[in-house]
Image (spheres, grey):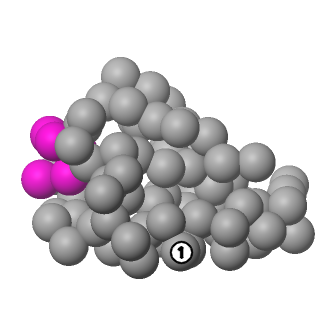
Amino acid sequence: MITTLNEESFGDFVKNGLVFVDFFADWCMPCKMMHPVLEELSKELEGKMKFSEVNVDENQQLSVKYRSEEHTSELQSH
């Protein structure tokens, strides 16, 4: 399962454990192509890693903070 995050929920979600955050845009074709792959990975790694997504158009401050201008995905370990 991929959890959709926003600027309010981001901090609490990523503060514990291994977290994969996909910074995406609805209009980004590579983002759309990666989504099914990330869905499958989230199922395979359930309980080992949390998967989340952040819409960069709706959460621009997070996009700037984590330098995701190119709508790439980031892996964060806490």
Image: magenta residue range: 60-64
Q: Is residue 70 visible?
A: yes
For the residue labelled by badge 1, is the local secondary structure a helix, a strand or a loop? helix
Q: Residue at x 20, y 73 (%)?
A: 70
Magenta segment's dominant SS is helix
- Whether the magenta-drawn stretch holds residue 27 is answered as no
Disc 1 marks which amino acid? Met
Q: Is residue 76 visible?
A: no
Q: How many marks?
A: 1
When the figure is inspected, residue 78 is found, relative to residue 11, above or below; the finding is: below
Q: Residue at x 50, y 43 (%)?
A: 15
Estimate the x, y position of residue 20 in percent, counting from the top left.
55, 62
Q: Residue at x 61, y 40 (%)?
A: 3
> Residue 40 lies in what quarter of the image?
bottom right
Estimate the x, y position of residue 53 in percent, counting from the top left.
49, 50
Label 1: few (<14), some or many (≥20) within 10 Å?
A: few
Estimate the x, y position of residue 75 in percent, counting from the top left.
48, 70
Describe residue 12's horizontal placement relative to residue 36 as left or right: left
In this orientation, which residue lies closer to the viewer: 12 or 72? 72
Estimate the x, y position of residue 52 in percent, counting from the top left.
56, 50
Describe residue 77's horizontal placement relative to residue 8 as left or right: right
- Whether the magenta-drawn stretch holds residue 63 is answered as yes
When the figure is inspected, residue 75 is found, relative to residue 39, above or below; the finding is: below
When the figure is inspected, residue 11 is found, relative to residue 28, above or below; the finding is: above
In this orientation, which residue lies closer to the viewer: 62 or 11? 62
The residue labelled by disc 1 is: 33
Describe residue 46's horizontal placement relative to residue 1 as left or right: right
